[in-house]
Amino acid sequence: MPVTDTLNAFVAHGLIEREPTGEGLLSGRTFAVKDFFDVAGVPTAAGSPDWLASHPVPTRSASLVDALLAAGARLVGKTHTDELAWSLNGENFHYGTPTNPAAPGRIPGGSSSGSAAATAGGLVDFAIGSDTGGSIRLPASYCGIIGLRPTHGRIAIDGAVPLAPSYDSVGWFARDPELFAQVGAVLFGGLKPAPRPTRLLVAQDLFEAAGPQVAAALKGGMDALSDLIGGAEPVSLAHGALPAWRNAFRLIQSSEAWAAHGAWADQVKPNFGPGVRERFAAAAALDPAEVAEAKALRESIRARMDALLGADTLILLPTAAGIAPLRD
């Protein structure tokens, strides 16, 4: 039976049904896929009417779609995304904003907005999204569900519209921890037991930047982890350099987005919505020297993280700097 979309979570051209091709861990479960991933025979819009109009209908599905169908899950549709996935709000100038089931007066977060809303609202058991700079993590936080951005490259991202390939990652949402792990087992091709963590680091500078309301909301989880591991150690991740880190990410992401879509944007001249329009204009005018400096800083940040973390260490930090903003 087709899903009844009460949340504006699904794209109109993607209210489809694909039956399982096998049986397995996910038999009897339903799922949705962000309209950033290809499903054979169904257009991919990536949140942009101009992208939809200028690209052929895919003849092959993303490999993750095939894997989930083979594991017994049933696909019931494709979900809304921010335009070309280049926003964290979950608002789309062309297609509207999905309802946040956890807080209907607030935005759902993006860019995997429809997948998060559909999962949180019980329209599907789980949903697939992508995460470049928070596009799984932030909607999961705002909608009150479980979401994960795995290690970059851990899950194949073929059959997806790129944004910034050196950051783009596949992720997923679920309400139930057991199901969440089962989806992970399918997407990862199996799970291996991890070493039990013996250290818990708390990113004190990020909690301070987020403010007391966020810290209070996370205190219960932080205390539970601390009790489980045997204590927590405060640490400063960025030593006051968070603005520089954020700017480096912005520069690299913008340069890769322009490399991926600049020629298309010049040729098609799409009617971008607010925000995306300005980001593309800025990306077209980037200074290559600034991008090179940003990449060098990224390597130093990676070295910093490698020095802090090991197989036995968890680091705790807030996903968002505050609660979900109110809808316009």
Image: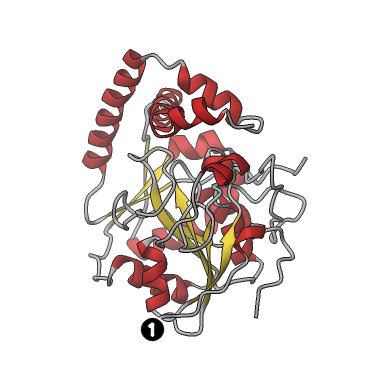
Question: Eyeballing the image, is 175 above or below 148?
Answer: below
Task: Classify residue 232 as left or right of residue 179.
Answer: left
- Which residue sits at x=52%, y=69%? 126
Amino acid bearing label 1: Gly
Q: Residue 288, percent across and down? A: 34, 16
- Give the mark count: 1
Q: Residue 1, percent across and down? A: 65, 81
| Kind of element beneath mark 1 | loop
The colouring scheme, among rainbow, by chain, secondary structure or one colour, is secondary structure
Q: Could you classify mark 1 by the number of other residues whose Cα lies within 10 Å: few (under 14), some (14-19), or many (20 or more)?
A: some
- Which residue sits at x=47%, y=32%? 264
Q: Residue 214, percent across and down? A: 58, 46
- Which residue sits at x=30%, y=30%? 298
Q: Nearer the viewer, residue 94 or 212?
A: 94
Q: Quadrant of the C terminus?
A: top right
Residue 263 is drawn in which quadrant?
top left
Task: Classify residue 308 as left or right of residue 110.
Answer: left
Q: Nearer the viewer, residue 131 or 157?
A: 157
Q: Nearer the viewer, residue 160 or 311?
A: 160
Question: Eyeballing the image, is 21 above or below 87?
Answer: below
- Which residue sits at x=54%, y=31%? 268
> Mark 1 = which residue?
22
Q: Nearer the viewer, residue 220 or 175?
A: 175
Task: Classify residue 109 as left or right of residue 255.
Answer: right
Q: Residue 234, percent across and down? A: 38, 42
